[in-house]
């Protein structure tokens, strides 16, 4: 038994497939984008260059895209909780890179990855999509009872002394007996 098996619940094949598809599709897109960017022979830190699929690129961004795509493909191959966690981390990094792009727009000396507004929007959108793939089936208040993450949450809850599960009780009438509204 590995450490990952002890820390994380076992996942069913449907959840693992969603995580793998998300990581694989994102990884393939990034590798293709990076490869097309390198084929254009841009300067490594150039602040000019052609647009690939509507996004500006340079050598550094192309290599970074290929590396990120390879990492996502690795997650798709490994699958399971690793793919889910990797999707979450990579998605968060893309959202952060969108903020980086916003910070350096209009400052060519600081814009070493040749970000334009289209790159910023892509980074935010791609980050949210990959993060959503990573959270799929893990984060919700209405997980089905056959979901391994729901079972793991329920098994960690402390039971009441009577053995009943924790519940939230809404108090409808806190004062038993007759109430006297103002004016009556």
Image (spheres, grey):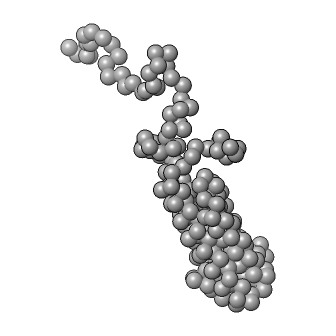
List x then y, in percent, for residue 66: 70, 75
Q: Is residue 55 left or right of residue 143?
A: right
Whether residue 106 is visible: no
List x then y, in percent, for residue 146: 44, 43
In the picture as drawn, the residue positioned furthest to the left comes out as 184
In the picture as drawn, the residue positioned furthest to the front comes out as 1
State the quadrant of the C terminus. top left
Q: Is residue 157 left or right of residue 96?
A: left
List x then y, in percent, for residue 29: 59, 75
State the quadrant of the N terminus. top right
Q: Residue at x 30, y 11 (%)?
A: 176
Who is closer to the viewer here, 73 or 116? 73
Q: Residue at x 65, y 40 (%)?
A: 6
Who is closer to the viewer here, 99 or 157? 157
Q: Residue at x 63, y 74 (%)?
A: 30
Who is closer to the viewer here, 173 or 44? 44
Query: Where, by quadrant of the figure, is residue 174 drawn?
Result: top left
In the picture as drawn, the residue positioned furthest to the top comes out as 177
List x then y, in percent, for residue 81: 60, 52
The image shows residue 184, relative to residue 127, as above or below, that is: above
The image shows residue 73, relative to residue 165, as above or below, that is: below
Whether residue 112 is visible: yes
The image shows residue 112, relative to residue 140, as above or below, that is: below
Question: How many badges with numbers are in the image?
Answer: 0
Q: Is residue 50 left or right of residue 44?
A: left
The image shows residue 107, relative to residue 82, as above or below, that is: below
Q: Residue at x 51, y 23 (%)?
A: 159
Who is closer to the viewer here, 165 or 44? 165
């Amino acid at each position: 038994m590995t450490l990952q098996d002890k820390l994380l619940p076992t996942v069913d094949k449907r959840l693992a497939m969603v995580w793998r598809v998300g990581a694989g599709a994102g990884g393939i897109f990034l590798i293709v984008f990076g490869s097309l960017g390198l084929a254009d022979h841009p300067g490594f830190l150039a602040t000019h260059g052609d647009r690939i699929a509507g996004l500006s690129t340079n050598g550094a961004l192309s290599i970074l895209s290929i590396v990120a795509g390879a990492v996502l493909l690795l997650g798709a191959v490994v699958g399971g909780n690793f793919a889910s966690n990797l999707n979450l981390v990579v998605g968060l990094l893309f959202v952060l890179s969108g903020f980086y792009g916003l910070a350096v727009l209009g400052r060519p000396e600081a814009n070493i990855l040749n970000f334009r507004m289209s790159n910023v929007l892509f980074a935010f959108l791609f980050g949210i999509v990959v993060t959503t793939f990573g959270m799929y089936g893990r984060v919700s208040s209405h997980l089905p009872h056959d979901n391994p993450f729901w079972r793991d949450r329920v098994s960690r809850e402390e039971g009441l002394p009577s053995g009943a599960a924790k519940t939230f009780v809404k108090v409808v009438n806190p004062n038993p007996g007759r109430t006297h509204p103002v004016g009556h």
